[in-house]
Amino acid sequence: MYKQETSLKKICIERGCRQGDPIASLLFILCIEILLIKIRTSTTVKPFKLTYQLNPVKQETINKYMEGFADDITLSIENSIESLKGVTDIIENFGNLSGLRINKDKTQAMIFGHNSETAIPTIETMGFEWVKEIKILGVTITCDLKNMEIKNFNAKYEAIEKMLKHWSYRTLNLEGRITITKSLALPKLTHLATVLPELDNQKAKKLEDLTTNFIWKTFKDQINKKSVRVNSQRAKLKPDKGGMGIMDIAPFWMGGKIGWLRKILQKDYNESQKTNNLHIQPINNDINKDTGTEDWLKMLINELAKISGDVSLTPIKILTGWGTQKMRKFGLQLKNKFWKAIFTGVEKLEEGFYHTYPQYMGEMVIWDTQKIRTRGIQLTARGANSIGYGETRDTLGITTINHLIIPVAKSITEATKKSNSIKTKQELEQQTGKTLDNQDYLDIISATQNMLAIHGTCLKNMENPGIGPQLEGLTRMLGWEKKGSKHFYNWQRAKINTGNLTKESENHINRTLGRMQSIKFFNGIYKNSSLIKCNPPQKFQEQMIGMHRQALNYIVSKNKNNNVEPGCTFCTIRQNNPIIELETHRHFYSDCIHVERYWTEIRDWALPNYNETFTIRDRIYGKFDQKPYSIDNTLLREARSTLWKCRLTKTIPNIADLKNRLKRQIPTLLLVNKSKEITLGLKKLKIMCEN
């Protein structure tokens, strides 16, 4: 080896290297690539071929040879004596040279394609096991591609069921069970979501029931007592929005599939330029020429080109010039069910993206988009004379909302920001070289303004794209993250009306407090409960209080089947109480005479060092405008937890129970909170407990 023209110590080349050496895998890949090159270039080994008739004068042929993953190689060759013997000879010769030989006991062969169920090998079995289905990288593929969804889903479902059964006997809290579902159970489906066509409602319901039963198994009140059961849709909201953060199966599945649209954007498409003018279309093209474009991308673009009638179709043209309604329309005509599911699901994803990031709405395609309508008619670029195309149908013209306004240099401050100037009819005609009717121009502007008005803006007030290159259509959305599908999942659920799901519990809270509370208040208590650390049982009870689903006697007794008296637990402990009040949230956390005495003890104990008056709202829900571990919220939350503990043990609450609880909790809280202000408050509370 040479380094900076200096000869280094000689390296003796020998066979093999030590087990576990990092270079072992790289050396193996280099060696196995020699075998793959030999198979690809062999004249005796014929590949599996797929031929597409793009138009009357043009054919596309896909040659499929192989796929390799380390030492796991899948060959796709034609079912002929020449190919089968040829590839076997190459592998045996390679084994003689390298020592790496094929293990025929672990090698399976399958006839793939039409009539494959009844087809037989062209020659003897050659020592291979001939099967009707084969598993490649964890996915079962059948010879006729039938029943693949059922076979693969059932296998994964059984694996998830078995895994959750092992975890169900462990003493996990609710947050732990949700984490197990997200991190261990559902990821088993991630790979399937990227290869299988769709997850029907029946399978989604079956999987959702399995995970839901696992999550709530140890919470008997939430399972058996309907009056305190959390609505399943409410539970799927994020914790800081008033939910539990349980995964929604259908968007999770679709999020994995949408990642293939990102691959369309990222992969190279180097096919020869085509034109929609059949008179100048080249006839004698080399159909076997390797352009470097991946086969699946060729097949998809070819099929979409046939459906749309646009021979010059490219991936960029689809992602920047097609509206989501157009993608849905042509997607429904695709024969491939996998891509059909993706193209029909883009509309919901785009709506969620622009709902989350309205500043990028100018990148939305105006043609064939569901929300852009005027007089009930959807805008459509009709024919080559439309301004939606360039000089011919092979190029794009005016496609996005940003194209309707004049780009200017972006303002540094809001004070210098000016309103946008809408392009006139003459400017659009000059830009595209097309003639535009007055009514068509008015329809385009009106439809766009109507859509923007729904989002609280207009062409003059929307974000100006600025001078220079611009992202268009779906390109920003798909390029948001290089990998992963969590953001796709969140965007699909972005337009869910959380207000409708939280409305019932918020009305109960308003009645409990005797007056309407602000949105800021509800957002504050949801956020504070979601940020609780180190004490999952306490976090669960705080979330139940915010959802008005805590298993207090009055709430549980609403369902007569529960056979529970609605009276206050503390009032029933002392038999000499003349009146037993209903155990509501307000009574249990504030108005009960035993609880009021408890809060008085807290005030008298804290008064010398800490002068703070807690209202009824503070006692039940904490201070929404402070951080969850401020001295006020820590004291209030531990006081509520002490009350709940005393209820379970049927004892009257007292200040000694609270002080003991604080002594146990504060050291842990000091370890996880790095804020100087929070740390000082917790230390102050700790000193108070020790006195």
Image (cartoon, grey):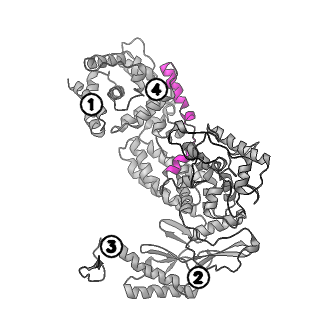
Q: Is residue 498 magenta?
A: yes
Q: Secondary structure at mark 1?
A: helix
Disc with the residue nearer the chain's start (1 vs 2):
2
Q: How many tags in the picture?
A: 4
Density class for disc 2 (Cα within 10 Å; few <14, some 14-19, many ≥20) is some
Quarter assignment of residue 284 = bottom right
Q: Which residue ends up furthest to the top in the rendered image?
A: 578
Position in image of residue 643 (x %, y %): 35, 25
What's the distance in space between the residues labelled 3 and 1, CA to CA? 52 Å
Q: Is residue 359 left or right of residue 537?
A: right
Could you tell which of marks 2 and 3 lies nearer the N-terminus? Answer: 3
Q: Which residue is mark 2?
A: 79
Residue at 61% over, 53% down: 346
Q: CA distance from mark 1 to mark 2?
A: 77 Å
Task: Look at the image and tell me whether residue 548 can be seen.
Answer: no
Q: As displayed, is residue 404 above or below residue 678? A: below
Please tell me whether mark 2 sits on a helix, a strand or a loop.
Answer: loop
Structural distance between the alpha carbons of marks 4 and 2: 72 Å
